[in-house]
Every structure is written in C-alpha cells, then in structure tokens.
Image (cartoon, rainbow, N blue to C red):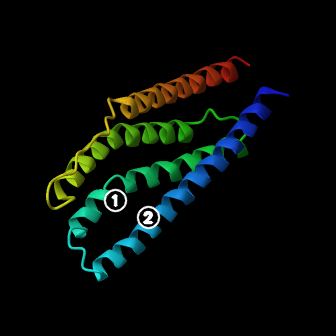
Amino acid sequence: MSDIKKIKRAALVVFCFVCASLLFQLAFMAHSMWLWRGWMAAGIASWNVATMIVVYLPTPIMLVSLIISLILLHTIRKESTPFNLRNVKRLKFIAIMLILLEPVLFLSERLFVHFWPPDGRAIGVTIYGGTIIAIGLITYCLALVFQYGIALQNQVDETL
C-alpha cells in the first residue's frame, strides 16, 4: 500500500473518531441542559446560570477545534497531497486552540469550585500540568513541518 493511501486511510479513521467525539460533546451539552432545566424547576438554587457559564466555558474552544479538525482531515483525504497552506493554517489554528484550552479549563474548574456547592465543600482535584499546552505546541511544530514540506515540494517542482 502506498504512503498516500495509508495517510488517507488513517485520516478516515481519525475523521470517524473526531465525528464521534463531536457528537458526544453535543449530546453531553444537550443532556446537561435538560438536567439543568429540571434542577431549576425543582428549586435547586445552587445550580445557577453562573455555574452553567463556568461549566460551558471551555466548550466553544473544544467544538471549534473539533470542527476545524474535521475540515483538515476531510481535506487530507480528498486532495492529492496534504502539503498545502490551508492545512498549515488549520494546524496552527488547532494548536492555538489547544494552547488556550488548558488555561480556560483551569479557570473553569476554579470558578466551578467557587460556585458549587453553596456551602463551599467542593474541592477541585484536576491537575492539567501543561499536558494540553504541550500537545498544542507539538501540533504547532507539526504545522511548521508541513510548511517546510510545502517549501521542499515547491523546490522539487521548480527543479523539474
């Protein structure tokens, strides 16, 4: 099997996984909104609008990253080469979104602990430790590798 076919097959598998992840994210949002309406109707005052904003603070970043990832994977599958400037820009955008995600998740968690529960007994235990930022930086480096691949491809084309 040629390398291009392997790339396209891998892009298809990852595309399916990202679609499932996006659907799961949307289903989670819909379910929690349904729960929230029930809690508000039942008079549970501690689950208020501020808490919902804090819970959903990182969601737009994740959704936009997943959608751009789907577009990137679709482009890789359909075009003759993955080395084009649109893919480089998409990779850089995803990298920036990942780098922004960790501080937003941290802030979201801190605010959630502040708002929930009202008696202040909640303790945040999630420690990100820079992992998502590191993945974002690695993604940015891969975008630069793609950019270099474009330059090499252009040099070969000019030589021929």
Residue 77: mark in rendering: none
Look at the image and tell me whether residue 80 can be seen: no
Q: Quadrant of the N terminus?
A: top right
Residue lying at the far bottom of the rendered structure: 41
> Which quarter of the figure has residue 135?
top left
Sort mark 1 into few (<14), some (14-19) or many (20+) by Cα contacts within 10 Å.
few
As rendered, which of 148 and 48 lies closer to the eye? 48
* Label of residue 56 in the image: 1
Residue for point 30% across, 82% down? 41
Occupied quadrant, residue 60? bottom left
Residue drawn at (44%, 64%), measured in percent from left and top?
Answer: 29
Is residue 148 depicted above or below 76 in this figure? above
Amino acid residing under circle 2: Met
Q: Position of residue 24 (x, y in %)?
A: 54, 58
Mark positioned earlier in the residue sequence (1 or 2): 2
- Residue that mark 2 sits on: 29
Query: Image check: 42 left or right of 98?
Result: left
Q: How far across and how far down the image is residue 73, in percent?
A: 63, 44
| 16 relative position to 98: left or right | right
